[in-house]
Image (spheres, helix red, strand yellow):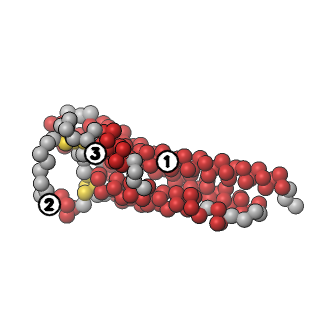
Amino acid sequence: MITEAETNKIRDEVYRKIGRNILFIQGIEQKLKNLIAINGSRINSKSKTLDQRLADVSKKTMGNLAGEFYEVYFIDQNQKSQKGVEPIEPIYSFRLERNAFATHMRKSLASIVEERNMLVHHFLQKLDVSKKSWEEADNRLEQQHKGLVATHESLNEFSSWLREIMLKDPSDISNKVSDKAPEELS
């Protein structure tokens, strides 16, 4: 017979993992906000500052951020041939061809949005008071955390790669971009 103390111990561990995973998701969300805000940075001081762009992006939902990250950083073959209006002022902007890394990130971020919504909105519905239910929840949260860690690491690698590119001599950027393309990061 399972004691109430044993069930409480598992329940407390589930609560701890819920908090850990929610905080991890918030870290991923903040990284997305930062990456989106820095792309398209204007050199001209009349444009929005980074703080203003961060304030704008801070109001977006996780689902919107995931989609915007993909659209901001990755361009498909059809878009490459289209000529748009040239910016009036110089900007820092990076758009990379959609490749395996882009597809991986799109799927990973979509999965995180689903996992976040399940955790925040539907998790309690799946629980009952049995030890088995708490154990299943514990296992699910552990698996969820592994996916969160993998996506967080991919975003960190992308961010590091992007930082390295931004610090390069602009006249030599096209050569530097191919040194370690994001496809190799996945």
Relative depth, front residue between 18 and 2: 18
Label 2 and label 3: CA atoms lie apart by 20 Å
Say which quadrant the N terminus sits in.
bottom right
Structural crowding at the residue carrying mark 3, measured as other residues with C-alpha within 10 Å and reported as few (<14), some (14–19) or many (≥20): some
Residue under the image location 41 percent in, 44 percent down: 31
Question: Please, what is the three-letter code of the amino acid marked with disc 2?
Answer: Gln
**Mark before the other along the chain sequence, 1 or 3:** 1
Q: Amino acid at mark 1?
A: Gln
Which of the 4 image quadrants contains residue 49? Answer: top left
Asked whether disc 2 touches disc 3, contact meaning CB atoms under 8 Å apart, the reply is no
Q: Secondary structure at mark 1?
A: helix
Residue at 68 percent of width and 61 percent of height: 136
Give the side of residue 34 with respect to residue 92, left or right. right
Whether residue 177 is visible to the viewer of this picture, yes or no, is no
Q: Residue at x 48, y 45 (%)?
A: 27
Measured in 3D between alpha carbons, the distance from the residue under mark 2 to the one under mark 1, in whole angstroms, is 36 Å
**Of the two numbered discs 2 and 1 in the rendering, the one whose residue sits closer to the viewer:** 1
Q: Which residue is mark 3?
A: 39
State left or right for residue 25 relative to residue 11: left
Q: Which residue is mark 1?
A: 26
Q: Earlier in the sequence, mark 2 or mark 3?
A: 3
Q: Which residue in the protein does label 2 denote?
A: 82
User: Horizontal placement of 113 versus 161: left or right?
Assistant: right
* Kind of residue at badge 3: Asn
From this view, report whether residue 83 is shown above or below residue 174: below
What is the crowding at mark 1: few (fewer than 14 residues within 10 Å), some, or many (at least 20)?
A: some
In what element is the residue under mark 3? loop
Q: Residue at x 25, y 51 (%)?
A: 95
Quarter-wise, where is residue 178 in the image? top left
The numbered mark at residue 5 is none
* Depth order, front residue of 9/47: 47
Tell me whether the residue at label 2 lies in contact with that at label 1, contact meaning CB atoms closer than 8 angstroms. no
